[in-house]
Image: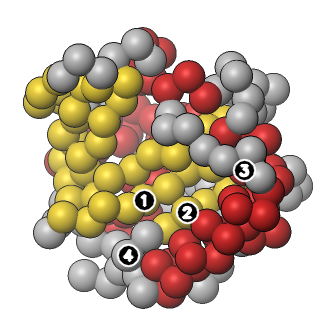
Amino acid sequence: MNRDSPAAPIVGRSIRLRYAEPADAEFILSLRLDERRNRFISKTTTEIERQAAWLATYKEREQAGTEHYFVIELLDHTPVGTVRIYDYQDDSFCWGSWLIKPDAPGQVAIESALNIYEFAFYSLGFNKSHFDVRRDNERVVAFHLRFGARIISSDEQDHFFDYRREMYEEIRARYRKFLPDQN
C-alpha cells in the first residue's frame, strides 16, 4: 500500500483538498472555535501560536505517511473546511476533523466525503474505515448511515462506525455527479 502524501492537491468537481500548513492555523482555529461547529469535537486552544505548533508537528506525521490533514477549498482557493485521515489500523483508516463553514456551498460536505473515500481507498490502498461520531450529532450520524456505514457499537457519548470499500463501491454510482469526470 502506498501511504505517502500525494504531490498535488486532490481535485474534485467543485472543491479541492490541499494539505494543511502552519499558516492555516487562524482559519482552522476559526472553525474549531465556532460555537455552531464545535459542540461535537474535542476542545482546543484559543491560541493561534499553539494551533500553528500543532500543525508543524502534524507535518512530520504527514511526511511519515501516517496522517493526512486537508483544508477543503473551493476551486477558486477559498477555504471552506477541514478534514483529516489518521489512526491507521492495518487496512483501516479513521477520518474526522471534518468541519465545514456554515456558508459553504451545499455540495461541499458530500463532495469532501467522497474525495476522502476516493483518496483513502484508491490512492492509499485501504479496505475499510473506522470512525466515531457523537450520538447527539444527528445530522452527521444520518449522513454516514445514508452512505451505508454501519454502527458497530455505541457508548454514552459516541457511535462507532465501520465502513468498507465494497460498501462505498455500492453507493459510488449514486453519487457520481459529485465526483470529477473520469477520463
- Label 4 to label 3, Cα distance in Å? 20 Å
Q: Nearer the viewer, residue 168 or 24?
A: 24
> Which tag is nearer the camera, tag 2 or tag 3?
3
Q: Earlier in the sequence, mark 4 or mark 3?
A: 3
The residue singled out by tag 3 in the image is: 28
- Label 2 to label 4, Cα distance in Å? 10 Å
Asked if the residue at tag 4 contacts the one at tag 1, i.e. Cβ–Cβ closer than 8 Å, the answer is no
The residue singled out by tag 2 in the image is: 69
- Label 3 to label 1, Cα distance in Å? 16 Å
Q: Is residue 17 left or right of residue 105?
A: left
> Which tag is nearer the camera, tag 3 or tag 1?
3
Three-letter residue code for mark 1: Ile
Q: Earlier in the sequence, mark 1 or mark 2?
A: 2
* Picture coordinates of residue 135, whole percent (x, y): 33, 17
Dot 3: element: helix
The residue singled out by tag 1 in the image is: 85
Q: Nearer the viewer, residue 119 or 68?
A: 68
Dot 1: element: strand
Q: Which label is found at residue 66?
A: 4
Task: Specify few, some or many for label 1: CA neighbours under 10 Å numbering under 14, 14-19, or 20 or more.
Answer: many
Task: Specify few, some or many for label 2: CA neighbours under 10 Å numbering under 14, 14-19, or 20 or more.
Answer: many
Three-letter residue code for mark 2: Tyr
Q: Nearer the viewer, residue 176 or 121?
A: 121
Residue shown at 38% from the left, 62% from the top: 86
* Picture coordinates of residue 161, whole percent (x, y): 22, 35
Residue shown at 78% from the left, 64% from the top: 49
